[in-house]
């Protein structure tokens, strides 16, 4: 997308594709600031971020909006209820929240405490189960227990039934039934069971192995028949209530969802024919998030909407039930990604910039070298650059500049070789880099005339680096692990045209700590157009749709810990209330995670200072500085923030 001269917030919305990936929750207001929307409530995200900094909460900060969680839940139920009405389906629908997607207490509490819709919780470990049993303060919540299970896990699930919850133990392997029978006898609790079948249908994408025959979980056809035999032999057929299957995560195409539902319903109908009276069908996850806003089959997009997804699921279930005379089950989905992705945003500040497109002085032979033959040493490069300057001044779009680019690359290589042999000085090499960079800049205006293999290389040479106050591995680990795309844009100055082509880098000492895929215009590019950054300016960047998986998957590369996090409630008058906040990890807490004891460190410091015979005053100041560093968080201080202040 070309940057128009009459740039406006409308152009910013189009360039950063906000209206397409934002699902109506995000926009750009007349002031050129990103705004957050939840129903009739709207909030200026830039204003909020600056308010938080004034209150002592610096950057990076994770901002969560629980109201968006509720709106996504509303959309799911509305879509399924409309699909049920359209198909005249006699069954019901329940949304199940997979706890693994985001285990934060505030997320679990919100889904539990909202009383507009029934909701179930899906857990995959003992820890997740015990968390639910502790947070779900009222009884009769449905808890679906997945994952491999030992006797302790099964006993804990049965104990959940004693607490008044409707706990369903989903059998993932043939051996689990005997553990269930043993534990149910010991504590005198009748279990409720489900079975997870392994579908042959698979989807394309980064998560294709979560479904299909290569799936880690689920019973094969033979194992299903063996399980039915054991259920009947133990008089336990009546315990089996739910059929569960999982098609995959982030499924971009509706045809793959349709194939999975059809195969799953064949299992459902066959089990009913064999005398297993199932009343619940759990179709698992798969509902995608359009991180790109492209409405396509891309791994990070989707070619359907929530309404179409719900219609697809219900119509197939309804059709099979009618055709094969099967009682219609209550349909469960586990669409945690779609339920949570939009509600969390990382806000960070740019702390430094490395510009690659400076306006360098004319490429001439007047060179302040270390010796009289400096011009001769760089003659080849200078001649090439002078030719490029003259050829680009003609502004002839028909000229093929590929040969110019090839000659420039050869000349630059010669300079680097000469420096390695000590034939030119460091000063000469620096000047050579400057005039070559100017030649790159000139050629960039004619990139359409270059061979495709040169265009990408030229773009790389001209992309600026902006360094941001965050850790990619802690806050957005899927970028590193899965080449995930998240929408990124500045929170302000969006009424100004961006002038720099930028790649964002984090604080870590790792070459992978950069973002090289961005949603821009009508494509995904390796750079993002941003505004000029100055060291005396505050320039805020937002990373959006990171509410699913990112918090729990984040690691402590370079010992960067959790960021500060706030939960914000929007008001219809444009104001807000911070309803919950958690300070970021202190250095002491991060060190404790790798078993470095702070008390032992303090003893070491005192002993070392005593050995240096430092004065009491100097030693006291040193200890105070070291202690302050321990209690600070692991990120860089924002100049206007005390970081860690109270609300």
Image (spheres, grey):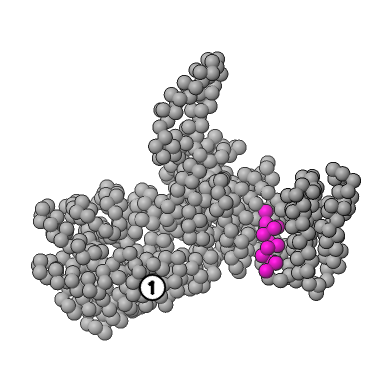
Magenta stretch secondary structure, dominant: helix
The one nearer the camera, 622 or 601, is 601
Residue 358 visible from this viewpoint = no
Tell me which residue sits at (41%, 68%) in the image.
208
Quarter where residue 450 is shown: bottom right
Residue at (78% x, 64% y) in the render: 407
Q: Which residues are magenta?
A: 453-464
- Is there any visible trace of residue 17 in the rendered image? yes
Q: Which residue is mark 1?
A: 202
**Residue 10 x %, y %:** 63, 63
Quarter of the image with the N terminus in it = bottom right
- Rendered position, 234 above or below 545: below
Where residue 560 sits: x, y (%)?
A: 49, 43
Q: Would you place residue 621 above or below residue 280 in this image?
A: above
Number of other residues with Cα within 10 Å of mark 1, as a class: few under 14, some 14 to 19, many 20 or more: many
Residue 284 drawn in magenta: no
| Label 1 element class | loop
Instruction: Report whether 324 appears left or right of 630.
Output: left
Question: Camera-side residue: 597 or 611?
Answer: 611
């Amino acid at each position: 997308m070309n940057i128009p001269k009459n740039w406006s917030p409308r152009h910013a919305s189009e360039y950063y594709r906000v209206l397409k990936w934002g699902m109506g929750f995000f926009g750009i207001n007349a002031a050129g600031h990103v705004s957050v929307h939840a129903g009739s409530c709207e909030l200026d995200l830039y204003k909020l971020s600056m308010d938080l900094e004034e209150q002592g909460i610096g950057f990076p900060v994770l901002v969560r909006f629980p109201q968006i969680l509720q709106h996504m839940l509303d959309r799911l139920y509305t879509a399924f209820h409309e699909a049920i009405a359209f198909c005249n389906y006699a069954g019901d629908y329940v949304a199940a929240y997979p706890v693994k997607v985001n285990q934060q207490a505030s997320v679990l509490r919100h889904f539990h405490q909202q009383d507009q819709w029934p909701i179930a919780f899906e857990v995959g470990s003992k820890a997740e189960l015990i968390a639910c049993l502790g947070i779900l303060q009222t009884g009769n919540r449905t808890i679906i227990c997945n994952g491999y299970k030992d006797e302790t896990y099964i006993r804990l699930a049965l104990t959940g039934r004693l607490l008044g919850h409707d706990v369903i133990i989903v059998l993932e392997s043939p051996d689990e039934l005997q553990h269930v029978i043993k534990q149910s006898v010991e504590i005198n609790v009748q279990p409720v069971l489900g079975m997870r079948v392994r579908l042959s249908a698979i989807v394309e994408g980064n998560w294709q192995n979560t479904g299909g025959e290569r799936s880690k979980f689920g019973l094969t056809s033979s194992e299903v028949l063996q399980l039915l035999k054991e259920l009947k032999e133990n008089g336990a057929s009546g315990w089996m209530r739910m059929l569960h299957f999982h098609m995959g995560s982030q499924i971009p195409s509706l045809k793959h969802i349709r194939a999975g539902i059809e195969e799953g319903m064949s299992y459902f109908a066959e089990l009913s024919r064999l005398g297993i009276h199932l009343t619940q069908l759990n179709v698992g996850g798969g509902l995608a998030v359009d991180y790109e806003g492209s409405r396509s089959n891309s791994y990070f997009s989707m070619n359907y909407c929530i309404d179409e997804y719900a219609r697809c699921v219900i119509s197939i279930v309804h059709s099979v039930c009618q055709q094969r005379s099967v009682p219609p089950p209550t349909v469960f989905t586990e669409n945690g990604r779609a339920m949570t992705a939009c509600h969390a945003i990382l806000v960070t500040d740019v702390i430094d910039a490395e510009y690659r497109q400076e306006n360098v002085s004319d490429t001439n032979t007047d060179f302040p070298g270390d010796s009289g033959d400096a011009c001769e040493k760089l003659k080849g490069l200078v001649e090439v650059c002078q030719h490029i300057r003259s050829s680009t001044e003609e502004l002839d779009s028909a000229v093929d500049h590929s040969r110019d680019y090839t000659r420039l690359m050869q000349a630059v290589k010669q300079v680097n070789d000469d420096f390695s042999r000590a034939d030119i000085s460091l000063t000469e090499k620096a000047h050579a880099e400057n005039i070559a960079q100017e030649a790159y800049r000139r050629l960039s205006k004619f990139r359409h005339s270059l061979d495709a293999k040169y265009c990408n290389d030229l773009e790389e040479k001209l992309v600026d680096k902006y360094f941001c106050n965050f850790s990619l591995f802690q806050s957005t680990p899927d970028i590193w692990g899965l080449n995930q795309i998240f929408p990124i844009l500045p929170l302000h100055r969006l009424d100004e045209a961006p002038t720099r082509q930028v790649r964002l880098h984090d604080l870590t000492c790792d070459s992978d700590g950069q973002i090289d895929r961005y949603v821009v215009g009508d494509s995904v590019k390796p750079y993002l157009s941003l505004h000029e950054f100055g060291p005396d300016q505050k320039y805020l960047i937002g990373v959006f749709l990171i509410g699913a998986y990112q918090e729990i998957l984040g690691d402590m590369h370079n010992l960067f810990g959790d960021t500060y996090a706030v939960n914000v409630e929007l008001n219809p008058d444009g104001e807000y209330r911070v309803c919950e906040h958690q300070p970021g990890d202190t250095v002491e807490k991060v060190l404790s995670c790798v078993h470095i004891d702070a008390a032992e460190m303090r003893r070491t410091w005192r002993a070392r200072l005593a050995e240096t015979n430092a004065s009491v005053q100097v030693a006291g100041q040193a200890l105070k500085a070291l202690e302050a560093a321990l209690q600070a968080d692991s990120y860089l201080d924002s100049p206007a923030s005390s970081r860690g202040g109270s609300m």
